[in-house]
Amino acid sequence: AQTVTQSQPEMSVQEAETVTLSCTYDTSENNYYLFWYKQPPSRQMILVIRQEAYKQQNATENRFSVNFQKAAKSFSLKISDSQLGDTAMYFCAFMKPGSQGNLIFGKGTKLSVKP
Amino acid sequence: DARVTQTPRHKVTEMGQEVTMRCQPILGHNTVFWYRQTMMQGLELLAYFRNRAPLDDSGMPKDRFSAEMPDATLATLKIQPSEPRDSAVYFCASGWGQYNEQFFGPGTRLTVL
């Protein structure tokens, strides 16, 4: 069975600085999808970024980028120029093709951006 | 602005009562998921549907939980009878196809006393 581990329960960063959130996963699959979701205090789950395992190039979305290390089964999220609105829980998630879209989530990292 | 809607947003009930949570997926999405979020267990998949047919509900306690999609615009999650351990936030999400983004609703915060 696949598992997703986020080893940092809480992190904090100063506004405008850069922070990296860690995620590791365990799978025997060769092809799969990885996601980072953001959950602000409003509780709304928002997709931040996704990565297909067959793509070597790391995904980027504006200030958000990932460092995908397939051999190490690592999928970290880097947030550049942190903003107060980035304060949220961040969840890493794994999806196996053929699983009908079943997302397996990590426990989350609570990120606080300080002014 | 298409979004998933869930009702109610908050529900407080007493143990033993029936609880029904509703979800309206985004128009055109053919897959609907129900998740439960707790501090201890995190986000857990309870059940999901594709084209209104249930595909997997193995994450759901069968004796008290049931999920249905009476039509393409409505998904329901029912708990009968409810127990204090069911207190959680229940999310509905919808998407199109197997590999595309899941759009989440705002969740229903359930408290069972």
Image (spheres, grey):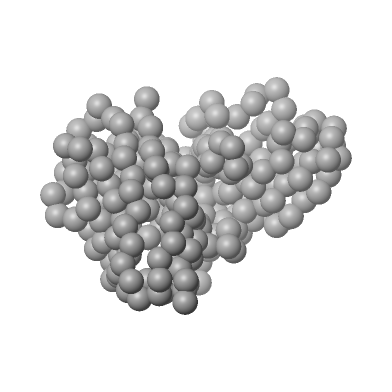
In front of the other: B26 or B46: B46
Image quadrant in which you'd find residue B66: top right
> Dividing the picture into quarters, in which one does residue A79 lie?
bottom left
Against B59, is A81 above or below?
A: below
Q: Residue at x 81, y 48 (%)?
A: B12
Tell me where residue A36 appears, x and y as whole percent: 37, 53
Residues B12 and B92: in front is: B12
Residue at 58% x, 48% y: name it: B91
Q: Residue furthest left?
A: A56
In percent of width and height, residue B7 lies at 70, 55
**Residue A86 at x, y = what percent?**
44, 68
Residue B102 on image: x %, y %: 44, 51
- Residue A49 is left or right of residue B63, and the answer is left
Residue A79 in sight in this render: yes
Q: Is residue B22 left or right of residue A81?
A: right
Residue at 39% from the left image edge and 42% from the top image edge: A7
* Figure check: B22 above or below A3: below
Marks counted in the figure total: 0
Residue B86 occupies quadrant: top right
* Extreme residue toward the top, this view: B63
Quadrant (top left/top right/bottom left/bottom right) for the N terminus of chain A: top left
Residue B34 in sight in this render:
no
Return the residue nearer the eye: A16 or B27: A16
Q: Residue at x 78, y 32 (%)?
A: B83
